[in-house]
Image (spheres, rainbow, N blue to C red):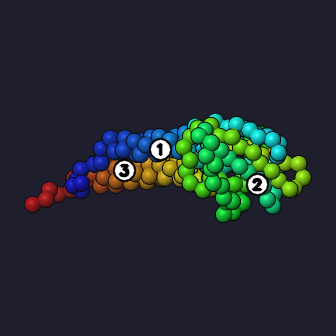
Amino acid sequence: MHPDVKPARSWYLLALAILIASLALAGIFVWRIIDTFPAPVAEARAGTSLTADLDREGLTVFTNRPVSSVDCTVLNNRGTQVPLRRPGGSEEISVGSTTWFVALRSEEPVRPGRFDVTCQSGDAPLVYAVGPHSSVFGFVGLVFAAIGAVFAGIAGAGITAAIVWAKRRKFLREHQPPPFGYPPAPPYQ
């Protein structure tokens, strides 16, 4: 930009566009948060079986309290057993007034479909549930990504607007006519 050219007010539209784009990105993250919330879709008491219809890849077995061991058999719609493993750390989610603890996950991604699940536990009476293979940590990551998109947009729009405002103010100060009674500046030769 040439030093004798005042920044156009249209640059404020760039700041507005940055803000709108970041809010749209945050909206996409919020939609993904809602879509991937790791909630159970079916529940039963230990020792009884349940049928769960999952519309997303993978499978997670939840329990209503932390347990030292739970033994589950999961069969897909073809009658093939789905291998399960314990998660690496402890994960829990709250859905309404119930807190669920992740007990087992499918070892490999399994296709969406209908699953017959039976779980046994040597611990006191237990309620188990089945849901999609969503990680609580991935869910929390999406929450932070949405918050980060909003803050980045506000910061980017604010910085852009502040720079344009400062340049416009500097230009106006440097190109202001002299106060009444002062002789005009000599022309440049």
Distance in Å between CA atoms under marks 2 and 1: 42 Å
Reading the image, the residue beneath label 1 is 25
Q: Secondary structure at mark 2?
A: strand
How busy is the neighbourhood of tag 2: few (under 14 within 10 Å), some, or many (20 plus)? some
Q: Residue furthest bottom?
A: 88
Reading the image, the residue beneath label 3 is 164
Quarter-of-image position of residue 18: top left
Q: Quadrant of the N terminus?
A: bottom left
Q: Secondary structure at mark 3?
A: helix
**Whole-percent x, y for residue 77 in the image:** 60, 38
Task: Tell me: 30 left or right of 156.
Answer: right
Cβ atoms at labels 3 and 1 below 8 Å apart:
no
Task: Tell me: 45 left or right of 154.
Answer: right
Q: Residue furthest front?
A: 79
Amino acid beneath label 2: Asp
How busy is the neighbourhood of tag 3: few (under 14 within 10 Å), some, or many (20 plus)? many
Q: Residue at x 30, y 48 (%)?
A: 7
Distance in Å between CA atoms under marks 3 and 1: 24 Å
How busy is the neighbourhood of tag 1: few (under 14 within 10 Å), some, or many (20 plus)? some
Cβ atoms at labels 2 and 1 below 8 Å apart:
no
Q: Residue at x 56, y 54 (%)?
A: 108
**67 vs 81: above or below:** below
**Whole-percent x, y for residue 25 in the image:** 47, 44
Q: Nearer the viewer, mark 3 or mark 1?
A: 1
Reading the image, the residue beneath label 2 is 71
